[in-house]
Amino acid sequence: MDDPIVASLCDASLRSSDVHLINGPHWINDAVIAYAFELLLHPSSSILMTPAVAHLLVNLDQESALGLSASMSLDKAETVFIPVNDSTELDSPGGSHWSLLVYSRAANAFFYYDSLNKYNISAAKRVQRRFAKLIQKHKGDDSLIHSISAAPYFQEMDVQAQINGYDCGMYVIAMTQLLLSRVSATEAGVSGKPGDQSLWRMRTCLTPETVAKTRVWLYEKVAENARMRGFLLLD
């Protein structure tokens, strides 16, 4: 069956079948999250990790992971947004549930956001253990310039629960969008300080209605890109 690429942005591409997932109500895959992350404006000090790269960094051997993270300047990033998936397959970030892990250098913490309470917490802690080694600053020979004085801690953050079985990936996009706006405002000196706990709170700020609007926003952005490429989305 023909499944053409209908939208493309930087390194992210969406096929017709991917766009069908966005239009909903459907669980979204790693390709959709990667495309959404390309859309989100963010400070140069922040890294939005695609699901595929995050999955690769967790599953590579330590030496290979250090090499890849160095090419991304991960050790210089102030904030890193990492989609977490419960997949146990080494070659795919598929799985059945998405959550979000955010590293803040200023807070020296990994903040864990999950729209199904602690569903992905084991996977998230596995990601944290690997990334805690990758975010430390290195010399050219991969030896540490200095170790972080205390290991980054892991903090679970309250999130309003999703009300269906398919919106977890859209929650990841909506939470990333909201947190990025706060990080940008903080770095611009408009509000707060980078290490403030209030910067990372989510409980009362994100509702299922907000997430539904995020899905509409994403579909409209994809449809606009598709039209530029000569495709008319019909579903």
Image (cartoon, grey):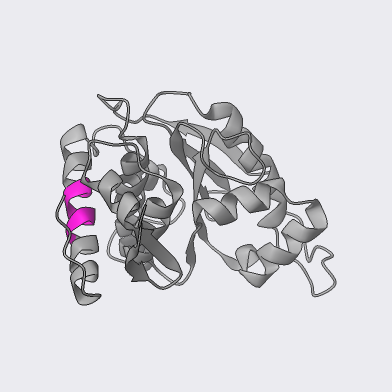
Give the x, y percent position of residue 47. 49, 62
Tell me if residue 211 comes above or below residue 224 in the rendering.
above
Q: Main secondary structure of the magenta part?
A: helix
Give the x, y percent position of residue 132. 67, 48
Q: Nearer the viewer, residue 118 or 17?
A: 17
Tell me if residue 156 comes above or below residue 192 in the rendering.
above
Q: Nearer the viewer, residue 26 or 34?
A: 26
Judged left or right of residue 55, residue 195 is left
* Quadrant in the rendering for residue 139: bottom right
Give the x, y percent position of residue 97. 45, 32
Q: Can you name the residue that lies furthest to the front here?
A: 1
Residue at horizontal 24 percent and vertical 62 percent from the top = 222
Tell me if residue 52 comes above or below residue 97 in the rendering.
below
Tell me if residue 119 comes above or below residue 36 in the rendering.
above
Which segment is the magenta one? 214-220
Magenta stretch encompasses residue 196? no
